[in-house]
Amino acid sequence: MTRADVSPTPARYLLFPLLAALIWSVNMIVTKMAAGVIAPAAIGFYRWALAGLLLTPFALPAAWRQRRALWPYLPKFAVLGGLGMALYQGLAYVAASSTTATNMGIITAMIPLLTIAVGAVVLRERPSLMALLGGLLSLAGLALLIGEGDPARLLSVGANHGDVLMGVAALAYALYGVLLRRWGLPVGPWVSLYVQVAFGVLFQLPAFLMAPASPLNGDNLPLVLYAGLFPSLFAPFLWMQGVRHLGPARASVFLNLMPVATVAIAALFLDEKPHLFHIVGGAMALAGVMLAQMRAPFAAGRRARAAS
């Protein structure tokens, strides 16, 4: 096949993963803004309850028709709902009270790298040399970022509580992605999302009932509406369309825009002025993630010769 035989990708397909990444970036800002105006347990519950309610007319009939196929996999759906909906976002809402949206965005950008590490443990996938080098570079960048320009500070003072929680949240989401790929659930993406959301709401209900009252009001209602609509429903739809038209590898490149967009939006709306350690540490972390997702040229050439 010649280069002329390959039709170019329509530009509109690039908008799908781009808009999804921007929606998730804005959600970092919304998560930070929610700190102080609504309890973390409340916004976590309201967000996924709203998403589940809006999905019900469309997804429930299909889920009911596929109930026999769903039933044996309910424990796995429960684990996924607990990791991806309850734990990941729940910890992020708690972390927002003691860290910045800038740090949250950069730490979240580590999820692809953490996914490689979790895959090595859970799936016994041997990480490549590029992944190991990228991991070391990203860890150095994170140490610079969390240590506020002095990595040695972590040894004496320790990491910020919010940064640690955000790191655990990112690790939970990495495990979520690995298990989702390993289990290969036999239903469509919307039914899968709907059942996971239902478990996420169920798991967050006890914390919501035990938390201090945090009623909806004019300050927090717009944040709940954004969280329940855009990152919970619209972004997954756009992301699935991007993966469908571009493939997972090309679509995942757009995730690297998230920390950049988060830093820019946080500076604009939250007055979080980036310091030099943010720029250098974030760039190192992002470069490490991109390096880890690359394949060594000599390895690719060796595979090509073996296949010929």
Image (cartoon, rainbow, N blue to C red):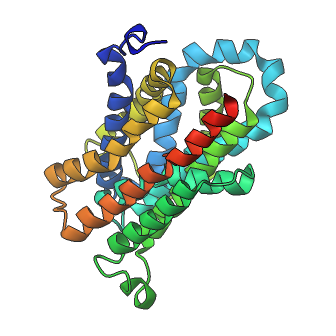
Q: Is residue 191 above or below residue 135?
A: above
Residue 40 relative to residue 206: left or right? left
| The residue positioned farthest toward the bottom in the image shown | 156
Where residue 205 appears, x then y in whole percent? 60, 47
Where residue 57 appears, x then y in whole percent? 56, 14
Q: Is residue 221 above or below residue 55?
A: below
The residue located at (37%, 18%) in the rendering is 13
The quarter of the image holding the C terminus is top right
The residue nearer to you, when weighing 103 against 6, is: 6
The residue nearer to you, when weighing 29 against 183, is: 183
Q: Is residue 100 visible?
A: no
Residue 224 relative to residue 240: left or right? left
The residue located at (30%, 59%) in the rendering is 283
The residue located at (68%, 30%) in the rendering is 307
Q: How many marks?
A: 0
The residue located at (44%, 83%) in the rendering is 158
Q: Is residue 301 visible?
A: yes
Where residue 56 appears, x then y in whole percent? 57, 20
The residue nearer to you, when weighing 224 against 300, is: 300
Residue 230 relative to residue 89: left or right? left
Where residue 77 appears, x then y in whole percent? 71, 37
